[in-house]
Image (cartoon, rainbow, N blue to C red):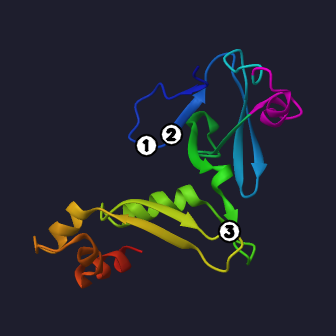
């Protein structure tokens, strides 16, 4: 079941496209983002034998809550499509009241580090700061240290790796 499609040539990553015929989309504010909600024949009418989960999954107008956020590529030209804007369920507030888009920040960190981390986890709910837990890409780190035969922990502590991670962050 597809609800949106990009049916034109584009170099843009993360483009969701436009709704298919018969699909109704609405964007509902949730925190600082717009959650995509959908009503269409391709959407299940609910959870099998689970009225409680069904009630939570659909809003008061019968739209299914995807949990995905989107924004217009160009607000002045909505026909250019919607762009993925993370997951609303992954967003959280710091104790300062600042909203953090964990998925957006995770992608930005991984990109900024140019492959030095395999993955990252963003945390900080109700804390004064954002925390990051990263998994080192040992192959990329070995290239950085020019093949020095270091163990995993020594590789992660190597000043060349530490400086590169700090610079990326």
The spot of residue 96 in percent (x, y) is: 73, 78
Q: Nearer the viewer, mark 3 or mark 2?
A: 3
> Quick check: can you spot residue 73?
no
**Residue furthest out toward the right:** 60
Q: Are marks 1 and 2 in contact (CB under 8 Å)?
A: yes
- The stretch of residues the image draws in magenta is 48-64
Residue corresponding to mark 1: 12
Q: Identify the residue at image location x=45%, y=27%.
A: 8
Q: Residue 52's mark?
A: none
Which element type, helix, strand or loop, lies under badge 1? loop
Mark 2 Cα-neighbour bin, 10 Å: few <14, some 14–19, many ≥20:
many
Q: Identify the residue under disc 2.
A: 15
For disc 3, the marked residue is: 125
Q: Quadrant of the N terminus?
A: top right
Q: Is residue 48 among the parts visible in the rendering?
A: yes
In three-dimensional space, the C-alpha distance between marks 3 and 2, rounded to whole angstroms, equals 29 Å
Q: Residues within 10 Å of mark 1 (few under 14, many from 20)?
A: few
Above/below status of 11 relative to 166: above
Element marked by disc 3: loop
Q: Quadrant of the C terminus?
A: bottom left
- Magenta span has 57? yes
Q: Earlier in the sequence, mark 3 or mark 1?
A: 1
Relative image position of residue 151 (x, y in whole percent): 20, 72
Query: Does dot 2 land on a helix, a strand or a loop?
Result: strand
Q: Nearer the viewer, residue 5 or 137?
A: 137
Magenta stretch contains residue 156: no
| Front residue of 90 and 148 | 148
- Residue 122 position within the rendered picture, expressed as x and y whole percent measured from the top left: 54, 64
Q: Is residue 56 above or below residue 8?
A: below
CA distance for labels 3 and 1: 31 Å
Q: Residues within 10 Å of mark 3 (few under 14, many from 20)?
A: some
């Amino acid at each position: 079941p597809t609800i949106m499609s990009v049916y034109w040539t584009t170099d843009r990553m993360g483009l969701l496209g436009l709704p298919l015929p018969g699909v109704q989309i609405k964007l509902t504010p949730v925190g600082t983002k717009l959650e995509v909600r959908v009503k269409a024949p391709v959407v299940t009418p609910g959870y099998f034998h689970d009225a409680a989960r069904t009630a939570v999954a659909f809003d008061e107008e019968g739209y299914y809550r995807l949990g995905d956020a989107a924004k217009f590529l160009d607000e002045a030209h909505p026909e250019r499509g919607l762009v993925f804007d993370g997951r609303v369920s992954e967003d959280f507030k710091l104790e300062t009241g600042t909203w953090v888009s964990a998925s957006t920040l995770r992608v930005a960190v991984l990109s900024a580090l140019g492959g030095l981390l395999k993955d990252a986890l963003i945390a900080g709910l109700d804390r004064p700061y954002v925390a990051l837990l990263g998994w080192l890409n040992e192959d990329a780190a070995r290239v950085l240290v020019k093949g020095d035969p270091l163990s995993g922990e020594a590789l992660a502590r190597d000043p060349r790796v530490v400086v590169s991670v700090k610079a990326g962050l």
